[in-house]
Structures are given as C-alpha cells and as structure tokens.
Amino acid sequence: MHNKIDHFAIGADTLEQGVVAMEAAIGVTVPRGGKHDAMSTHNCVMQAGNESFFELIAIDHEAPSDPGRARWFTLDDPTTQARLAQRPRALCWVVSTDDLDSVIANSPVDLGEVVLFTRGDRSWRLTVPKDGSLPMGGMLPAFIEWSPGPHPSKGQQNLGVTLNKVLLSYPDSAELSETLQALQVDHLADVSNGPAALSFALDTPKGRVVLD
C-alpha cells in the first residue's frame, strides 16, 4: 500500500479573510480553486511540494445553505466557526492511498463513510464522517483515492511554499502513534505529548512558518 500526504486544509471564515491572512503569514496569494457542490464549500489551492497541495477552504455562501449533509472538516461545527471567525486555522490533513478499501477494512477506528466526488473528468473517493467530525479530533487524516490521471497539484501554481512536516500534539501521544502506525501513516507526521493540536510547518518565501 502506498500512502503519502495528498493535501492539507486551512479553514477560513471566508476565502477573502483566508487569502489576506495567508499573504501576511507566508508571503504569497493563494490562487482561487473551485467549488464543492456536494458540500457547499469552495477553496483556494497551490502546490506544496512532492505532489501535494495547500488548500484554503471556506463555506461558500453563494451555494445552497444546506447541502443535505454535514460539511467536511467540521465546518458546520459552531466551535470551529467561532475559531475561524478569529483567524484561519489548521483543520485537516489528507493522505492519498492506492487502496482505500483496504485502509477502511484495516483501520482500528471509524474513519467515516467513503464519499465519491467528481469535478470535470476527475473523481475521487474520500473518507467523510456523516456528522462532519474528524477522527480523533483531526489528529488522524482523511484518506483519499484519486481516479487515474496526473495528481491535481500538477495543474496548480508553484509559489515557493512547501509542506515540511505535519505536527500533531495529543495528551496520549503513545495511543496516537499506535493508531497512526496501524493506519501505515506514522512516517508522515511528528507526534508530541500535549494538548490536542494540529499544525503544519511550511517552508515559504518568508522562511519556516507554522500554521495552527
């Protein structure tokens, strides 16, 4: 099984808020991406090195207010919305796999249902809990399996931002490390003991920056 970091999501109250904050933090303007009709969200995206990408995501207020299910990455959660109203936050990391069914079958925790998404001639299958929550509060990644073809990052702009490391802090770091190992993704993140927190260390035009 080949598992690697596919992309990572920074949530914002609005894309406009997020773009301004990212310009200040990492020194680049994250380009507009697309819309997710099934979730009533939209994003800005750019390359982040090693066939991965940076995603800035927000609720799309021009889309239907009720997409018919809970939005991904806890975007419907009042606590998340209150935090995003203050500033953009690290929400989730996503791991690509070439055998999503095996990941689900062998996972020691419930990763959610597998939802099929399409855009143009590409499709992808993604683990999304029905209630919009994140496994272990976002410590565990969502898993994605793309349809055949070039990775989406190939068509995105390279603005000199690279993901250096996913950083995870958790009260029981041993438990988290064991779960990550069972999912075969323990090599993709650094785990420390402390309050639950997700952050991304990036190499940027402004130097090393940690977004949390």
Image (spheres, grey):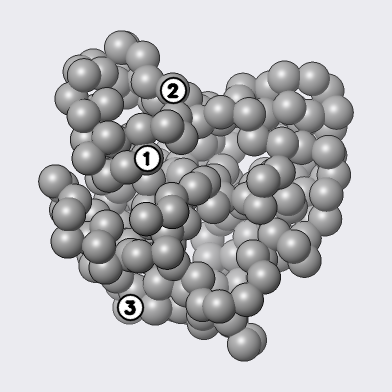
Q: Is residue 86 left or right of residue 28?
A: left
Could you say which disc has been placed on residue 199 in the image? none
Is residue 107 or residue 198 the one in the foreground?
A: 107
Judge whether 150 appears above or below 21 on screen. Answer: below
Q: Amino acid at mark 2?
A: Asp
The numbered disc on residue 68 is: 3
Residue at the limit of the structure toward the top, as seen here: 193
Residue 148 lies, in percent from the top left, at: 55, 78
Q: Residue at x 42, y 59 (%)?
A: 97
Q: Quadrant of residue 63?
A: bottom right
N-terminal of the pair, mark 1 or mark 3, is 3
Q: Element under label 3? A: loop
SS under mark 2? strand
Quote the CA–CA distance across marks 1 and 3: 32 Å
Q: Which residue is mark 1?
A: 185
Which type of secondary structure does the marked residue at label 1 adopt? loop
Q: Tell me, yes or no, if residue 98 can be seen here.
A: yes
Say which quadrant the N terminus sits in. Answer: bottom left
For disc 1, the neighbor class at 10 Å (few under 14, some 14 to 19, many from 20) is some
For disc 2, the marked residue is 190
Q: Is residue 120 left or right of residue 170?
A: right
